[in-house]
Image: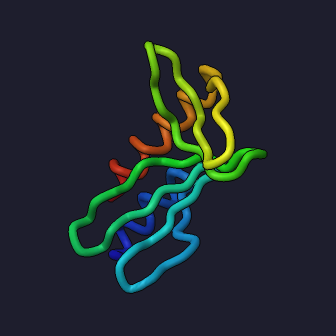
Amino acid sequence: MTEQTRARLAERGIQAVAETESHVLYARDNLIALLERRHGTIGSTGMLTGDGLAYLIWRDGQAYLKSKHAENAATEQQVEAVRRFSEDLAGAM
């Protein structure tokens, strides 16, 4: 990762919290996303909830946070947080 990329991530409050040869895990607050190094592909943003890691899904126009064991309606604030994190991460890369 270049120093410029590191600086852009820091400006957005995003940290690389774990790395392997093939992936980097980025986080801000309770949001996380994996970046696949070889192709620079950013995976879906997940949110850490009381039910574990949950992903934003849409069904019949309604947003939900879906984890392995639960599915709960997402608030407008949660939807906006996921959207902002995803956009900020993509913009920093």
User: Residue 62 location, x and y as percent?
Assistant: 51, 16
Up the image or down, 31 lies above or below 9; here it is above
Q: Position of residue 4 (x, y in %)?
A: 35, 67
| Residue in front for this viewpoint, 61 or 2 | 61
Query: With 1 as the anchor, is 74 left or right in this view?
Result: right
The reply, left or right, for residue 65 in relation to residue 41 is right
- Quadrant containing the C terminus is bottom left
Q: Is residue 59 above or below residue 14?
A: above
Q: Give 70 or 20, whichever is nearer the viewer.
A: 70
- At 57% from the left and 28% from the top, the residue drawn is 64
Q: Farthest residue toward the front?
A: 69
Q: Kindly identify the residue that appears in the image at 44 percent across and 14 percent down.
A: 60
Q: Residue furthest left?
A: 39
Rendering coords of residue 1 (x, y %): 35, 76
Task: Please tell me which residue is depicted at 30% across the width and 73% down the height of the picture.
Answer: 37
Quadrant in the rendering for residue 5: bottom left
The answer to whether residue 29 is visible is no
Residue 20 placement: quadrant:
bottom left
**Residue 30's x, y, as percent?**
66, 50
Residue 15 in view of the camera: yes
Q: Residue at x 48, y 56 (%)?
A: 33
The residue nearer to you, when weighing 12 against 21, is: 21
Q: Residue furthest right?
A: 50
